[in-house]
Structure formats: C-alpha cells, structure tokens
Image: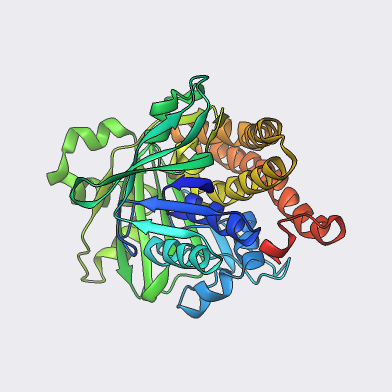
Amino acid sequence: MFDVVIAGARVAGASTALLLARAGLRVLVVDPAPQGRDTLSTHALMRGGVLQLHRWGILEQLIAAGTPVIDATTFHYGSERIRVPLEPKDGIDGLVAPRRFLLDELLSDAAALAGAHVLRGWSLADLTRESSGQVVGARLRGPEGRSMDVPAALVIGADGRNSRVARIVEARTLVEERAATASIYGYWPDLADDGYHWHYGDGAAAGLIPTNDGMTCVFASVKPERLRSVGGGGLTELFDGSIDVVSGELGERLRSTAIEPRLRGFAGAPTVLRQAHGAGWALVGDAGYFKDPLTAHGITDALRDAELLARAVTDGLGGGRLDRTLAEYQATRDRLSAEMIDVTARIASMEWSLSEVKELHRALSRAMRGEVELIRGWARAEPAEGHPLAQAVA
C-alpha cells in the first residue's frame, strides 16, 4: 500500500512526488509517456518558481545542463521599450526558462532518487472507492492491457488540463474565464537576446524566451478565431504578420537569420480553476488550475501548488486531519490565484490599448508578490518549526 498515488510525472506531479518522498511518504507516480518527451510550454519561470527549484537543489542542475540565467526582462509597448534588470536575490542570480524535457526529467529523477516509485507506460484508468464514496486507491492500466489496483490513502491528479482524475471525481469548476489566446511558436538559434522580451501591439503579442542549447523560443499570440481562420497551412503567414504588428524590426531580424524553424500552433483554451480536493483525492497543476499562457506563469503556478499540496498532505496524513489541510491547500491556492486569473483574462482578451496593457502588467507584478513572500516564508520558518518538509527542501 502507498500513502499517495500520483497520476502524471511532469512538473506538478514530479515536484509533488519529490517533496512527499523526501518527507518519508510512500509514493507511486504513473505516467503513460516515456521520460524525456517534450511538451507545449512557455518555458519561462518567474521568481517564486526559481526560488523553489533552488531550495530543492534542481536549479543548479538545470544551469549545469546549459540552461541560461535570465538577468533582465524587457517589455515592448509598440515603440516604447522598458528594461527591468533582475537583481540577484534569495540566493538566485536570475530567472531560467528550461526546455520541458530537461526540467521534467530532472524533477522525475529527483523524485525517484528520494524514494518515489516512478512507473512509466502505466496510466490511471479509474479510482477505487468505499461504499461511502471515499477514494481508497487507483486502478492502473499498463502495457498489453495489464491492470492492477493500488491501495492508497490519497490519489492526486497531476494529469493536465484534460485531467482524467478530475473527470472521474466530477471536480466542480469554481472559475472559468473564456478569454483566451492562440499561439504560434518555434525555436531560433543564436538570437543572443539579453533576457526575456515581451512585445505588445494592435491585437497581437509576442515573446522571446532564451532556453537550452543556444535556442530562443519565439511565439506570437492572437485571438483564437484568427488561428482557426487560417488553419494549419497558414501558420507561417499568420506568425510573420503578427510579429510585424508588434515589431517590424523583430520580424526583419527573424527573417534575416535564413532559419525556417518548424512552427507549432496552440488553439487556446479557457482559464479554469477547479475544486482541488475531495474524499481521498486532490488535484495539482493544470489538472486543478489552468490559465492562458500569455502571462507565462503556468510552470511557476505548478511548482507553487505542488509545495502547497505536499505540505498539506504531510501535515494531514501525519495528524489524521487530511480533510482540513487539503481544504487549507485549496483556500491558499485560490487566494493567491484570484487576482492573477483576473489580470491574465484581461490581457488574454486582446481588448486593450498599449497604456492599458502596461497597467495590467503592473497589476500582474503586484499579484506575484504574495506567492513570492509565501515561498520566502517557508524558507525562513521551516528550520525553526521543524516542519516535516524542512529536510525535503533544505
């Protein structure tokens, strides 16, 4: 029997497993995908997430693997350019934007090293319950139709925005924002950018995010109906036109490289905040909270909520009050996310002037302060309090 079964071994699931295993819990993680597979991602991490990875000992591994340190963020509002240097603080020199095949693999390997059982090629097919409805384990499906039932005190869905766990337990939707953006992105070598660059223009946005192997992820975001109108065959034309709208100089720069990277499209999806726990189950990451990627906060959200949930599970299982600590997990997640959801939806609407989106970014910065202070507070309080996760994050 395991204390916890986690469906999903990417950022949210692997981080939760890592912290729970380091705290001494018996953890099983299942994922149908092989390790090292890439996935759609903005790559960019904000300060809170980078601080967590530093505390967990993962940041140094990312940098050693060639992930560049980001020491500035530049916002472009039409022709106006605002550069924000990122000062070293909290033991970190800047931000990072790792490729997901690297970040996910390092977190998954760290979870396994800590004692978690990571089972690839298996997926969660169903939940097992008592007559009262209490979830008491997971029914797993593996290669060649094999299956097995695994008892557990808690089953966690970290299986993405189309979470099977969320569907099975019929997790309620608490917030839904229809405003969404569609994105087209690719990777360019040797752009040599000094940090993150975010561009905004009439009905379009774009970004440059330096990542591993000397590559820069370049994306253009528009309203979803514009992507639907061109279909897959019009990605290049829509991408080039959107880049030119936000910055003709950037468009010329990309075309002058003589590189024609493969472009990929994301049609967009609504922001959804779901009920995060119930009798014997919990959700983390995109399974419980997905918002438009234009503000590039998804990975940071996943890391934050993984630690929130790990603390709740460690406290609750040890003291026989899991229902209460999971309720506190959801309440804290919702409080930290409320303003972020509102601001992101307004930015994703594309219904703003350049002066208005500038003010929205100031509001976004204020919304991020609460989570950063929470994470700093964990670092300050754990040694004095002797919290079970102190060893996990030291």
Q: Nearer the viewer, residue 362 or 34?
A: 34
Q: In which quadrant of the rendered view does residue 227 lie?
A: top left
Residue 124, position as x, y percentages in the image: 36, 41
- Inspect this view and state whether residue 351 appears: no
Where is 42 relative to 154, above or below?
below
Q: Nearer the viewer, residue 146 or 286?
A: 146
- Residue farthest to the bottom, as pictured: 64
Look at 37% across and 37% down and name the residue there: 181
What residue is drawn where x is 82% and y is 58%? 386
In the picture, residue 125 is in which quadrant? top left
- Residue 289 position (above or below residue 300): above
Placement of the C terminus among the 4 image quadrants: bottom right
Task: Count all numbered tags in the image, as a single digit.
Answer: 0
Residue 218, image x, y percentages: 36, 58
Colour scheme employed for the rendering of this structure: rainbow
In the depicted view, which residue is nearer to us: 57 or 392? 392
Give percent across and percent down for residue 13: 48, 50
Q: Is residue 221 left or right of residue 261?
A: right
Where 361 falls versus 44 (above or below)? above
Q: Position of residue 55 (x, y in %)?
A: 67, 65
Above or below 302: residue 321: above
- Residue at image position (61%, 70%) is 57
Q: Is residue 211 among what the camera can see? A: yes
> Residue visible at 38% across and 66% down?
216
Farthest residue to the left: give it: 233
Is 233 positioned to the left or the right of 132 in the image?
A: left
Residue in front for this viewpoint, 99 or 393: 393
